[in-house]
Image (cartoon, grey):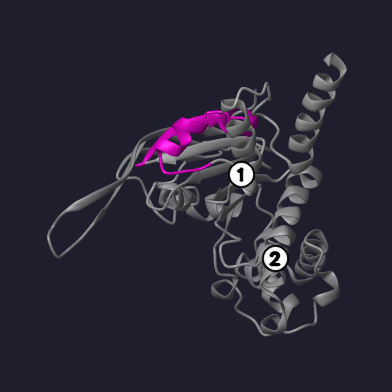
Amino acid sequence: MSDPILKTESLTFSYHTDEDKTAKTVLDGVDLEIQPGSFVAVLGHNGSGKSTLAKHFNAILLPEGGKVYVDGMDTTNEDKLLEIRRIVGMVFQNPDNQIVANVVEEDCAFGPENLGVPSPEIRERVDQALKAVGMYQYREHAPHLLSGGQKQRIAIAGVLAMKPRCVVLDEPTAMLDPNGRREVMETIKTLNREQGVTVVLITHHMDEAAQADRLIVMSDGKIVQDGPPREVFQQVETLRATGLDVPETVSLLYELRKEGLDLPLDALSDEACADAICQLFSAEKKTV
């Protein structure tokens, strides 16, 4: 197995308030390794620590205790900060906060320009990034005229133009309608599967988490579940105890199982769920 591109060791972090001098622990001894080229979703209720963890992956936040390593580099090493942020790009909830130019292609060029990339290479990077997210035909448009999903894809393109090996997306679909969410999720999966970009998706949507290769569930600053979504989502009661639910398909199968029907809990998609139910009733008909 290759060396992890992201690694935390006993990571702790607290938010301190000036008013009453108290500290709220948000990350509590997190140990985690993420391999290059993987697609990992981090799921958790509000306040679970998932967004704080995301901000540690490219040194927006630094550990209060423990360590964070990006491709073997300690994020507290100031000399490595630029290289760390070249390796790990961040995409946030609100694309309007990341779009800085009045023309799509100029916005996409902003990051490479700040890195000192030569102009001919910037042109090539911008075109490649916009094509990768399916937005090349909008390169001369004004970003503010685009839909929410299109804006988020432009924000992703702006990060891709800096050629990161890993993209961390902190609830990128939280402000989008279902069509926008679908557009962004398709873009994320394409980047991972066709370009080999490591993806860390922070989300509270069960259906998004189910599309990852690996699912990490956080609660109260700790990792409470870690594994393939098909396995993690079978822990229905454990997840509900942490304030989370499971995909609607799993919830349906779980309720049917409680009624005595022999159904699997690992059918995450609508199609797989329907197939499992159909197969059960087909088998019962044959035995009658």
Q: Which residue is mark 1?
A: 209
Residue nearest the observer in this picture, 97 or 7: 97
The residue lying furthest to the left in this view is: 20
Residue nearest the observer in this picture, 123 or 225: 225
Q: Which residue is mark 2?
A: 180
Asked if residue 22 lies left or right of residue 109, the reply is: left
Quadrant for the C terminus in the image: top right
* Residue type, numbered disc 1: Ala
Residue 129 among those drawn in magenta: no
Local crowd size for mark 1, using a 10 Å CA cut-off: few (<14), some (14–19), many (≥20): many
Q: Which residues are magenta?
A: 220-245
- Identify which residue is drawn at 74% across, 48% down: 189
Local crowd size for mark 2, using a 10 Å CA cut-off: few (<14), some (14–19), many (≥20): many
Residue nearest the observer in this picture, 160 or 142: 142
> Decide: marks 1, 2 in contact (CB < 8 A)?
no
- Residue 17 numbered mark, or none: none
